[in-house]
């Protein structure tokens, strides 16, 4: 057993020296977190903004103009384009110039008197994310809109706030302003580690095989599993550094600090990193050239991002896809890390994902042991 | 010796501060075998690469067969054959297919090719392996085959960079027989080697050390200068020794009496010496004569020492007797001939392009890994991406704390569960529900107050409506944002229904307060995320996979040495680029059709617009991204580097290209970046055709932009691929 540890540490030392001299890899360690931080923290968002829309105001009354103003004031929309005909408005949607068309009928003012004012909204369903949100936003603004405002102001006894049949008092926990960057930043480390672990190790074995050093190592009194563990060890250290590189600037520059314990996050990170490194190494053991290794690892990373729920919430995915994503370590790590970082969860709350990650690592280790059995021929 | 066929003057190459080749001057006589020797890293390969126009010198002039290589590197290519350190056969192709490829590049075909190949096959002993895969050939045979292919077009000069490295002695001897045969037939051979004994086969030798010439002379001359010369020993009885020594000394060489006879030292053996020696031997009963020639290794060692002692000295080691050759200068031909020449050049270019296309297609289809990637990745991406983005809320875990526990509150729970939007989980305490939110068990929590049913009845007469407390897990922004709209809709409908049952409301209906919105989504009435993602997936696959495949394919050629070989052939950069992207473009166009059918059959998503227009527009975009791959790979040294670049450049694609995240939601600076990415515009086109049934007229602007990107990127690809270091 002691012998095994020495072997592992010896291989780890060698690997660390190799990494130390790999400048492009070190550059990636810095460039990647920064670019992700900027893009996810600042650039992308699911919240609609700058939505181009048009208004067909057949009523052309104070009431209708005030509705348009209120919609514009919501902050989601660009100033409305006024169209003269229904066809013109539809053409705007067809050409992709606008996302929504608000149609106010000629009798809008009259329906207010009768108490059933209705407007029509046409949405560009080609972009369902935006359309769904915008539809909700428009309905909300319109529901709160009080066409009798002018009249009521003159009647001080009237109740100003208007509500539906049920007064829904809602709050968004953890992220009161529904800021998308929180959603992304809490999974930033998960994304970076996936990239890092897989791209670093995919070349591990095949690279040594190509350069002939793998044979050399096998000729030493080192077992294949010891070689693998030794190769992975330095990356574990790098991964922790990477988690810090992801967390600290997000806190300093974007004011996004984890709500939960960093120590707990570090504990959960270990089985995830080991499992991911193991998968990368397994890929490396399957292929015969480094180009193939890279292909396979890239095509493992990409679906991982999509299916795990780091980019879009897994809760909304259809059952089959959601379950499929469950085989990815990234799914469980992002669940755990979001719970800790965003919601301040404790050990009990992340026990299940952590356990799953540990089991995944064990399974991958077994697979590796089977793959790396010395083979003749 | 007539005029020199290779002439280098002041040839210098610096890489940054490092001077790899330092002011070389040498000339090579036609029909000679010229050995270019030196240690690893002494500048041999750099020099060769400059001579054949792969590398632009920092200073100096090069003339090869009358062509100024620096000014017109392509013009020299028909005159020369080149074989690099890595024999440049395409591993996946058979020898015969390699032959057809290179023959095509040199414009050799039909009967002419067969005749030439019959001759070469015979001469290089390749008949038995003609249909073997290049990767299966033993090193010696591969070397011979490489040489045969380099001489295919009957070059006037052969450049061989360490042709015998790693080859066994037997094959090396055979190999040198061929080289000498070529030289005997009038071909000039410029060869580098580490085997000093091979210098014996050469007519002229240059030694280079740290980029500087330290010797430049025929091998015999170098041997004379840098050794004690020949030792001739005649074993004689003691009495005969003084007389023999005198007789030998009479020839002018230094002779001395030693232990068992006489020894003569001379720089060069002459017939006078040999005659004198044999006369002495005959006079003493055929006394044994031993002649020791200085080993070339010893000569080399001495030469190196001399060079170290006098770093600047032996530049003028030996003057090269060369008569200045008339430089071939062709004056411009008359117009009608120019037109004919242009059409010939065009036909030759088409022939070369065909060869490149055939080879690329063969290589692509023969690699099972590539074929598997090309088929599985697009389809897997389609299915995975197509299904992951949903905007409707389904089975979302909702914690329900019922403080009212009446028919009304139960009705609300039932309504929330009814259409499948929410999965209700009952909780009994506020603490439990808070914990469930923290642990992520539920995404929404609803807390019903004790007076819920009572307020439902009384509401309206100035009394407030019953309130519900709803907590969303704001961490999952998209879930919370979407769930909110769903929840409000269901809650209001249920409230209205419940109130209606409880009796007629007094006073005006409450809806009168707000404005009702009748919303209808056109193009995609159910706001299904699948068509949106399917159309975007084309953008993803065709940007990412194309770039990756091209990048890896080119870098593999560079690592394998075939890329260098390709650039020594008459094929132009444009032909090489087109030879890569046309077959791959065709393959990806087939991929597009495959994806279109899969999306339709498996996901039920067919383009709303014209499918043919979609495929055509997409094929156009494929060439844009293939060019990007070429540019990335032309600037990468290893496959790993190419892929790293591709992956790094794909980050903006996935996040900023509008694939998942709408561009208009971004801050303005990032929107500009997005607009600068070709994929952004293609994704826009794909979605417009798929979802809005847009036609060429609506998309003219975007199509034009993509075309513009294409022109610019292909032009850059031509430049990068054609660029000399």
Image (cartoon, coloured by chain):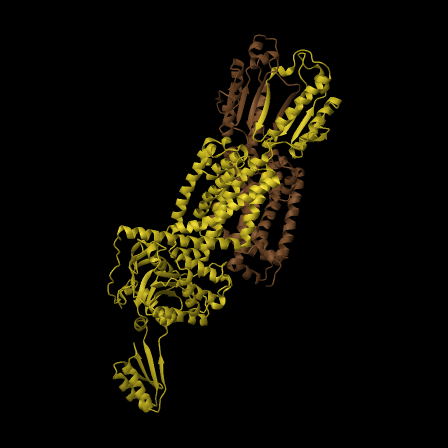
Q: Is residue A228 left or right of residue B668?
A: right
Residue B571 visible, this orientation = yes
**x, y percentage for residue B557?**
46, 55
**x, y percentage for residue B447?**
69, 25
Q: Residue at x 47, y 62 (%)?
A: B96
Q: Is residue B359 above or below residue B471?
A: below
Residue A302 visible, this orientation = no
Q: Residue at x 50, y 58 (%)?
A: B92
Q: Is residue B500 above or below residue B349?
A: above
Chain with brown colouring: A
**x, y percentage for residue A216?**
54, 61
The quarter of the displayed image where residue B166 is located: bottom left
How many marks can you see? 0
Q: Is residue A86 above or below residue B287?
A: above
- Front residue (pair B212, B669): B669
Q: Is residue A77 left or right of residue A278?
A: left
Q: Is residue A9 above or below residue A352?
A: below
Q: Is residue B376 left or right of residue A82?
A: right
- Front residue (pair A322, B194): A322
Chain with yellow colouring: B
The quarter of the displayed image where residue B482 is located: top right
The quarter of the displayed image where residue B155 is located: bottom left
**x, y percentage for residue B477?**
58, 31
Q: Quadrant of the N terminus of chain B?
A: bottom left
């Amino acid at each position: 057993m002691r012998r095994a540890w020495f072997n592992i540490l010896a291989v780890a030392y060698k690997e660390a020296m190799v990494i130390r001299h790999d400048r492009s890899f070190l550059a990636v360690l810095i460039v990647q977190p920064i670019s992700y931080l900027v893009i996810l923290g600042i650039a992308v968002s699911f919240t609609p903004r700058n939505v181009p829309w048009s208004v067909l105001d057949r009523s052309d009354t104070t009431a209708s103009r005030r509705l348009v103003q209120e919609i514009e004031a919501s902050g989601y929309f660009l100033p409305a384009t006024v169209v003269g005909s229904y066809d013109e408005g539809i053409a705007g949607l067809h050409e992709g110039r606008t996302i929504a068309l608000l149609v106010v009928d000629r009798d809008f003012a009259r329906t207010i008197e009768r108490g059933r004012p209705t407007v029509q909204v046409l949405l560009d369903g080609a972009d369902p994310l935006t359309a769904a949100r915008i539809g909700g936003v428009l309905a909300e603004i319109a529901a709160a809109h009080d066409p009798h405002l002018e009249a009521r102001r003159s009647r001080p006894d009237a109740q100003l706030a208007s509500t539906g049949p049920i007064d829904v008092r809602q709050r968004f926990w953890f992220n009161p302003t529904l800021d998308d960057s929180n959603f992304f930043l809490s999974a930033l480390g998960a994304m970076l580690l996936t990239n890092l672990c897989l791209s670093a190790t995919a070349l591990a074995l095949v690279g040594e095989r190509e350069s002939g050093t793998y044979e050399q190592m096998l000729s030493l009194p080192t077992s294949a599993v010891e070689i693998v563990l030794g190769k992975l060890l330095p990356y574990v250290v790098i991964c922790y550094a990477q988690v810090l590189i992801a967390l600290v600037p997000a806190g300093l520059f974007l004011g996004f600090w984890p709500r939960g314990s960093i120590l707990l996050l570090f504990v959960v990170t270990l089985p995830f990193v080991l499992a991911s490194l193991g998968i990368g190494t397994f890929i490396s053991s399957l292929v015969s050239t480094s180009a193939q290794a890279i292909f396979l690892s890239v095509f493992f990373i990409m679906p991982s991002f999509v299916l795990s729920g780091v980019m879009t919430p897994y809760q909304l995915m259809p059952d089959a896809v959601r379950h499929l994503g469950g085989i990815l370590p990234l799914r469980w790590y992002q669940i755990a890390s979001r719970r800790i970082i965003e919601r301040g969860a404790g050990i009990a709350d992340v026990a299940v994902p952590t356990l799953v990650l540990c089991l995944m690592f064990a399974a991958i280790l077994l697979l590796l042991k089977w793959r790396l059995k010395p083979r003749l021929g | 010796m007539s005029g020199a066929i290779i002439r280098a003057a002041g040839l210098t190459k610096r890489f940054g501060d490092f001077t790899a080749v330092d002011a070389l001057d040498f000339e090579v006589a036609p029909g000679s075998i010229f050995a270019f020797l030196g240690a690893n890293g002494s500048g041999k390969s750099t020099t060769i690469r400059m001579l054949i126009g792969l590398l632009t010198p920092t200073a100096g002039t090069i003339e090869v067969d009358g062509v100024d290589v620096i000014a017109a590197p392509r013009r020299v290519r028909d005159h020369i054959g080149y074989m690099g350190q890595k024999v440049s056969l395409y591993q996946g192709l058979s020898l015969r297919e390699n032959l057809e490829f290179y023959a095509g590049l040199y414009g050799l075909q039909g009967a002419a090719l067969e005749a030439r190949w019959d001759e070469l096959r015979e001469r290089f002993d390749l008949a038995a392996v003609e249909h073997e895969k290049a990767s299966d050939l033993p090193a010696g045979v591969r070397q011979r085959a490489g040489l045969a292919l380099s001489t295919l077009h009957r070059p006037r000069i052969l450049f061989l960079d360490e042709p015998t490295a790693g080859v066994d002695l037997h094959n090396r001897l055979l190999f040198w027989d061929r080289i000498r045969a070529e030289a005997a037939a009038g071909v000039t051979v410029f060869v580098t080697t580490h085997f000093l004994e091979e210098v014996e086969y050469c007519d002229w030798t240059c030694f280079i050390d740290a980029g500087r010439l330290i010797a430049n002379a025929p091998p015999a001359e170098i041997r004379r200068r840098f050794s004690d010369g020949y030792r001739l020993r005649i074993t004689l009885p003691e009495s005969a020794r003084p007389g023999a020594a005198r007789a030998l000394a009479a020839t002018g060489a230094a002779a001395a009496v030693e232990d068992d006879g006489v020894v003569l030292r001379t720089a060069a053996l002459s017939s006078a010496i040999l005659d004198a020696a044999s006369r002495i031997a005959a006079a003493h009963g055929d006394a044994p004569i031993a002649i020791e020639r200085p080993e070339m290794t010893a000569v080399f060692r001495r030469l190196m020492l001399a060079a170290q002692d006098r770093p600047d000295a032996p530049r003028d080691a030996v003057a090269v007797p060369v008569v200045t050759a008339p430089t071939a200068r062709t004056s411009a031909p008359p117009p009608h001939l120019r037109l004919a020449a242009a059409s010939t050049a065009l036909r030759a270019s088409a022939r070369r392009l065909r060869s490149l296309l055939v080879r690329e297609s063969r290589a692509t289809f023969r690699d099972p890994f590539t074929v598997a990637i090309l088929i599985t990745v697009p389809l897997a991406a389609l299915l995975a991406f197509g299904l992951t983005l949903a905007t409707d809320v389904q089975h979302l875990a909702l914690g329900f704390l019922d403080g009212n526990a009446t028919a009304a509150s139960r009705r609300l729970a039932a309504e929330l569960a009814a259409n499948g939007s929410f999965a209700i989980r009952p909780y009994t305490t506020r603490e439990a529900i808070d914990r469930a939110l923290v642990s992520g068990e539920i995404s929404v929590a609803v807390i019903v107050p004790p007076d819920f049913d009572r307020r439902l009845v009384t509401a309206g007469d100035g009394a407030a409506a019953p309130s519900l407390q709803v907590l969303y897990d704001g961490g999952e922004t998209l879930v919370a944002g979407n769930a909110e709209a769903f929840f409000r809709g269901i809650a209001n409908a249920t409230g209205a229904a419940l109130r209606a049952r409880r009796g007629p409301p007094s006073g005006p209906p409450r809806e009168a307060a707000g404005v009702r919105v009748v919303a209808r989504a056109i193009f995609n009435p159910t706001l299904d995320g699948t068509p949106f993602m399917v159309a975007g997936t084309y953008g993803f696959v065709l940007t990412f996979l194309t770039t990756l495949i091209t990048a890896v394919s080119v870098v593999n050629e560079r690592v394998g040495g075939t890329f260098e070989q390709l650039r020594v052939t008459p094929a132009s950069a444009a032909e090489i680029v087109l030879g890569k992207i046309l077959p791959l473009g065709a393959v990806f166009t087939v991929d597009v059709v495959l994806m279109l059918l899969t999306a339709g059959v498996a996901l039920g998503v067919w383009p709303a617009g014209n499918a043919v227009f979609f495929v055509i527009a997409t094929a156009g975009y494929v060439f844009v991204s293939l060019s990007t791959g070429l540019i990335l790979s032309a600037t990468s040294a290893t496959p790993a580097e190419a892929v790293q670049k591709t992956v790094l450049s794909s980050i903006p694609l996935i996040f900023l290209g509008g694939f998942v995240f709408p561009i208009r939601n971004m801050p303005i600076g990032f929107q500009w970046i997005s607009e600068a990415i070709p994929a952004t515009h293609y994704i826009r086109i794909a979605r417009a055709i798929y979802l809005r049934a847009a036609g060429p007229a609506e998309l003219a602007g975007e199509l034009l932009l993509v075309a513009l990107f294409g022109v610019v990127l292909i032009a850059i690809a031509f430049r990068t691929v054609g660029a000399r270091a």
